[in-house]
Image: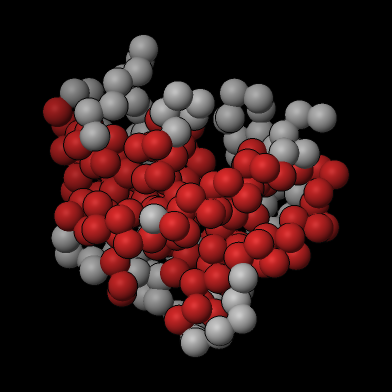
């Protein structure tokens, strides 16, 4: 069965969100594997590749501090701790896939997937904020592809104007405050083997 990696990322986000909030609340019994197993169960047949979910979730969790330190200079006006838990974990996932998974996940797919998660689960400005920060990361990491990266929310011209617009987006787009939120996921059939996806198969609310 072909894997549905967009749905996999939805589950990773849901699991990391719950894990972080419970850890911050002082839950001594919180266990990421238990959370992931619970979140995967309703979608296991549709998901296919559960190893992708466990692997990405654990790698991101193990690198919370490193990822946060790397992200902070890319959005200097918004301390990572003040960003909503949803946006914070989407940024962590996106940056990890950009910086560590380039051999299997094209950079444009990593960024576009993060933007789609932000559209589905974040606040009104989340997708622009996520796109701006990860666009800056793309540039600063010196990542190259056969074709130049074009952000999904394309709002600038070519070359320097486009890069400048991504940086402005990271600074001007106000992320959501860190408030309690509820994440719900549904099956998603919009992912192709190349990793392209839509948000039509995922839904969520943030209280």
Tell me if residue 155 can be seen: no
What residue sits 66% from the left and 27% below the top? 192
Tell me if residue 32 can be seen: yes
Location of residue 107 with respect to 57 vertically, above or below: above
Q: Quadrant of residue 111?
A: top left
Count the labels in the image.
0
Rendering coords of residue 109 (x, y %) = 48, 32
Instruction: Look at the image and name its color scheme.
Output: secondary structure
What quarter of the picture does the N terminus occupy?
top right
What residue sits 67% from the left and 42% below the top? 51
Location of residue 111 with respect to 185 vertically, above or below: above
Comparing 62 with 198, the one in front is 62
What residue sits 23% from the left and 66% below the top? 78
For this orientation, the residue located farthest to the top is 146
What residue sits 58% from the left and 46% below the top? 55
Q: Quadrant of residue 77?
A: bottom left
Rendering coords of residue 8 (x, y %) = 65, 46
- In the rendered structure, the answer to whether residue 66 lies left or right of residue 15 reads left
- In the rendered structure, the answer to whether residue 86 lies left or right of residue 131 reads right
Rendering coords of residue 152 (x, y %) = 42, 35
Comparing 203 with 136, the one in front is 136
Rendering coords of residue 110 (x, y %) = 46, 37
What quarter of the picture does the C terminus occupy?
bottom right
């Amino acid at each position: 069965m072909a894997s549905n990696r967009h749905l996999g990322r939805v589950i990773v986000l849901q699991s990391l969100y719950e894990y972080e909030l419970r850890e911050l609340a002082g839950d001594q019994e919180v266990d990421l594997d238990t959370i992931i197993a619970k979140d995967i169960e309703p979608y296991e047949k549709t998901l296919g590749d559960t190893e992708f979910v466990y692997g990405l979730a654990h790698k991101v969790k193990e690198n919370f501090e490193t990822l946060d330190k790397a992200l902070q200079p890319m959005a200097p006006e918004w301390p990572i701790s003040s960003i909503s838990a949803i946006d914070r974990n989407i940024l962590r996932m996106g940056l990890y896939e950009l910086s560590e998974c380039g051999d299997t996940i094209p950079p444009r797919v990593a960024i576009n997937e993060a933007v789609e998660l932000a559209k589905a689960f974040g606040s009104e400005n989340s997708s622009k904020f996520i796109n701006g920060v990860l666009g800056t990361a793309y540039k600063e990491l010196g990542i190259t592809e056969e074709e130049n990266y074009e952000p999904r929310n394309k709002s600038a011209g070519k070359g320097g104007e486009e890069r400048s617009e991504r940086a402005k987006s990271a600074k001007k787009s106000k992320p959501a405050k860190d408030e309690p939120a509820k994440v719900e996921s549904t099956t998603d059939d919009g992912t192709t083997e190349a990793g392209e996806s839509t948000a039509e198969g995922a839904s969520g609310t943030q209280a």
